[in-house]
Amino acid sequence: MTATPDVDILVIGAGQAGLSVGYHLRRLGLAPERDFLIVDHSPAPGGAWQFRWPSLTLSTVNRVHDLPGMSFEETLPPGSENAQAASAVPHYFALYEKEFDLRVHRPESVTVVCDRSTPATCPNEAVDGLLHAELKPAASTESPLRVRGLVNATGTWDKPFIPYYRGAETFAGRQLHAHDYRTATEFEGKHVIVVGGGITAIQLLDEISRVTTTTWVTRREPVFRTGEFAPENGRAAVAIVEDRVRRGLPPGSVVSVTGLVEDERVRAARARGVLDRHPMFDHLEPEGIRWSDNTFQRADVILWCTGFRSALDHLAPLRLRGPGGGITMTGRLATQVAADPRIHLIGYGPSASTIGANRAGRAAAVELTGYLGLA
C-alpha cells in the first residue's frame, strides 16, 4: 500500500534544466511546495554559471539560451557584451525564480535517494511505495523527503573528469581541471600542458598562451567546422547521443559529434601558432610528459580540459545503471528511466546542453505528471 507523500515531485537542481522543469510544472497547474519542490545545493541562484572563471564573458561564452517564458537579453543592461557570465547569468536565473515563484530551497543537497517499494535499496525500512530522498541540511524540509516522482537535474559541473595516465602521481608540478581554473596570470613563467579537444580547451589555451608557453594535446585530431552551424547539424548530433542512451549505452557528449567552430578567435589563435596540436602523451614523469616515441616535454602545469560526467552518485541505491555503465532511457526526448518511469534525468545524454535542457524540461514535466496522474 502506497503511503502519503510529502510532495508529489522532487526536482533536484536549479540550473537551466531544473528551472525549466519548474516553469512547466507551474504551467501544468502544479503549485510549488505543495505539489512539487525544487532543491539546489548551490548557495545562490545561477546553477554552475556562478562558479565559472572570471574571463568567461558574454562575448566569449558559446551561448546563453533563454529559459522558457523570459528572455535573457531583456535582463541585461545596454553595453553588457563583456559582462562576466558568472554574474550576468545568475542575475537572470534569480529574476526568473522570482518571476515564476519557483521557491527554490537552497542550499540543500540530496545525499541519497532510495526506493522503499524495493526494500533492498532502503534496508530496515518499511515498504511504502515511495522514493525517499535524504537531504542535507534539512532545515527547510523533512528528511527523508517522501515523493512519488523525481526529476534529476544535477547536470555535470560537480563531476569533473580527469583520466588516469601512468605516472600521474609522480608529476612534481601542478595538475588541475578546467573546473578549478580562474585566471591565466597565475601560470605566468610556467609551461602549461593543455589537455582536451573541446570548446573549453580552445578557450583556455588561447588565454593562457597569451601570458606563457603552452603545449596542446588531444586524444583525437580536433575537427573544426567553418560557416554557420545549421539547426539540422545540432539535431543530428543530439540524435546520435539519444540513440546511445535509448540502447542503454554510456551517452558520450553532444559536443564530441558537433566539431569546433572556426571563428575569428580560433583563426587568430591559429595565426599565433597556438593550435599546434600534439597527440596524447603516453605517461607523466616528475618533470613533464613523455610520448610513446620517447619525445619529452618539460612542464610545470597540466590543465585537464577533459570534460565532466553526470552527477548521479546520489541515485546509486536505485541501481539504474546497466552492466556497461549506461542507463537505458525512454520517453519522447529520452529523459525517462526505462526501468523506473517515476524518474527523469535531465542533463544526461541528449539533454546535456542549455537548449537541450529547455526542451527536456518540458518533456519531463509533461510525461511525469501524466504518469503520476497529476495532469
Image (cartoon, rainbow, N blue to C red):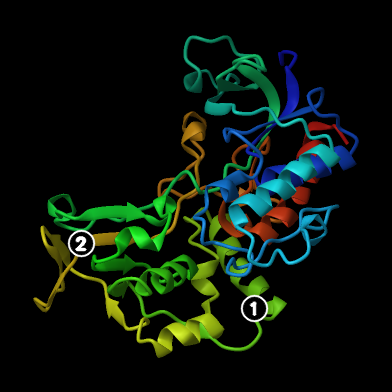
Q: In the visual, does 153 lie left or right of 5?
A: left
Q: Is 49 located above or below residue 142 in the figure?
A: below
Q: Are marks 2 and 1 in contact (CB under 8 Å)?
A: no
Residue at 52%, 53% (x, y): give it. Answer: 52
Above or below, 139 relative to 297: above
Residue in front for this viewpoint, 335 or 133: 133
Q: Secondary structure at mark 2?
A: loop
* 2 or 1: tag closer to the N-terminus: 1
308 left or right of 166?
Answer: right
**Local secondary structure at mark 1:** helix
**Looking at this view, is 257 or 331 the one in front?**
257
**Circle 2 crowding by C-alpha within 10 Å: few under 14, some 14–19, many from 20:** some
Q: How many marks?
A: 2
Q: Residue under circle 1?
A: 233
Rendered image quadrant of residue 138 = top right
For the question of whether residue 332 can be seen, the reply is: no
The amino acid pointed to by label 1 is Asn
Q: Amino acid at mark 2?
A: Asp
Q: Quadrant of the N terminus?
A: top right
Mark 2 = which residue? 300
User: Which image quarter is the C terminus in?
Assistant: top right
Percent position of residue 165, x then y: 21, 58
Q: Position of residue 299 (x, y in %)?
A: 19, 66
Query: Which of the 4 image quadrants contains residue 175?
Result: bottom left
Label 1 environment density (alpha carbons within 10 Å; few <14, some 14–19, many ≥20): few
